[in-house]
Image: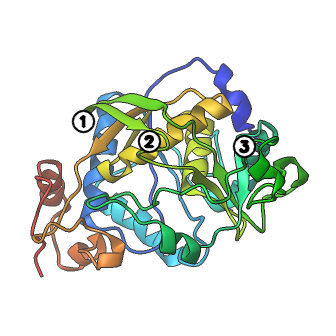
């Protein structure tokens, strides 16, 4: 097994892009537009494209959706050089089989004192925190309820939440949530290839974020960083709703000693009412278009030149 924490020695920077669908439903035209952009950028660069099956959501991920996403992407004209069905040097390419990689990263963060256990439930957080108006980000700013206080403070001596939760006492992450303690006030800046300069302030624009869930599943943030580093991805192409996640992930790249990739965030495809297309909104699926007899060549041309707001046909 390749150790993702030792891959930084590789200085080869041949373009390596990736498609990273989650098999929790059928792919829709919003996914297709982003994936086509990733495919085209890898092709134009003469690089390698990786398909990664992000199947960590054991409650919603289904084998039939894995089959469907491969078939639908091939139907749309996309091909890749590494993936679950092809293999490759950096296998396995399904996240459900990469637990050892995530545990190694969790232990490194634990030993460095960069993460802490959190016993807040979603219900607890819903009562005290909510996303800011207009935000696309799925993770509300954490108010710091379980964040450890300085050891010598009077409040710490009083045993407030989190004070008896020494991270190094945990051999495994299961049973509690684990949060990355962000450096409050620090500005995280990066240049997006498509959208230009970006800037987020830790502790203001986002708070301490999850790296491992109490049901013993690594978070998207941690798994994405570990896998992109392990698979030596040089450019990440994804939707602009993940811009703030990029700031979080940059902190993880630094903490784990990884070299960050370049970033290319695509405008979101929205319906006629301005809502972004998503599986939970029953958006128009590629499988539906196939069954309607749509020509994939016409669809590719339409999606690559599509404005950020469309009105899907019934």
Which labelled disc corresponds to residue 246?
2
Q: Residue at x 55, y 19 (%)?
A: 12
Local crowd at mark 2 within 10 Å, few (<14), some, or many (≥20)?
many
- Residue 137 visible in the current orientation: yes
Q: Residue at x 30, y 48 (%)?
A: 240
Where does the image place residue 259, in percent across and percent down from the top left? 56, 26
Where does the image place residue 67, in percent across and percent down from the top left? 48, 70
Q: Secondary structure at mark 3?
A: helix
Q: Quadrant of the N terminus?
A: top right
Q: Secondary structure at mark 1?
A: loop
Q: How many marks?
A: 3
Q: Secondary structure at mark 2?
A: helix
**Residue with the most extreme bottom position:** 314
Q: CA distance from mark 1 to mark 3?
A: 30 Å
Which labelled disc corresponds to residue 105?
3
Q: CA distance from mark 3 to mark 2?
A: 18 Å
Residue 217 placement: quadrant: bottom right
Q: Are marks 3 and 2 in contact (CB under 8 Å)?
A: no
Return the disc, 3 or 2, that comes first in the chain's sequence. 3
Where does the image place residue 181, in percent across and percent down from the top left? 63, 44
| Left or right: 244, with 304 as reference point | right
Local crowd at mark 1 within 10 Å, few (<14), some, or many (≥20)?
some
Residue ID for mark 1? 195
Where does the image place residue 136, in percent across and percent down from the top left? 32, 59
Q: CA distance from mark 1 to mark 2?
A: 13 Å
Which labelled disc corresponds to residue 131?
none
Colour convention: rainbow
Using the image as rendered, state which of residue 248 and residue 162 is in the foreground: 162
Q: Residue at x 81, y 59 (%)?
A: 159
Q: Quadrant of the C terminus?
A: bottom left
Using the image as rendered, state which of residue 296 and residue 255 is in the foreground: 255
């Amino acid at each position: 097994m390749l150790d993702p924490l030792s891959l930084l020695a590789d200085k080869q920077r041949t373009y390596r892009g990736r498609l990273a669908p989650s098999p929790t439903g059928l792919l829709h035209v919003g996914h297709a537009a982003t994936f086509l952009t990733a495919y085209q950028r890898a092709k134009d660069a003469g690089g390698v494209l990786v398909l990664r099956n992000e199947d960590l959501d054991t409650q919603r991920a289904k084998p039939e959706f894995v089959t469907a996403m491969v078939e639908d992407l091939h139907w749309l004209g996309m091909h890749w050089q590494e993936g679950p069905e092809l293999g490759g040097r950096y296998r396995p390419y399904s996240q459900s089989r990469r637990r050892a990689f995530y545990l190694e990263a969790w232990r490194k963060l634990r030993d460095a004192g960069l993460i802490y256990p959190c016993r807040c439930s979603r219900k607890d957080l819903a009562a005290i925190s909510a996303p800011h108006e207009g935000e696309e980000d799925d993770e509300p700013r954490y108010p710091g309820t379980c964040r450890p206080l300085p050891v010598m403070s009077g409040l710490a001596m009083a045993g407030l939440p989190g004070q008896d939760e020494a991270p190094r006492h945990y051999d495994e992450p299961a049973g509690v949530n684990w949060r990355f303690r962000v450096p409050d006030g620090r500005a995280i800046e990066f240049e997006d290839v498509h959208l230009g300069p970006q800037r987020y302030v830790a502790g203001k624009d986002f708070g301490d974020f999850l790296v491992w869930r109490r049901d013993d599943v690594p978070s998207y943030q941690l798994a994405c960083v570990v896998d992109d580093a392990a698979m030596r991805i040089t450019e990440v192409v994804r939707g602009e709703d993940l811009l703030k996640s990029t700031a979080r992930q940059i902190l993880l790249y630094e903490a784990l000693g990884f070299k960050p990739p370049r970033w290319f965030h695509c405008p979101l495809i929205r319906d006629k009412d301005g809502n972004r297309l998503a599986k939970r909104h029953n958006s128009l699926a590629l499988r539906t278009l196939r069954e309607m007899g749509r020509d994939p060549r016409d669809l590719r041309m339409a999606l690559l030149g599509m404005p950020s707001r469309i009105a899907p046909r019934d």
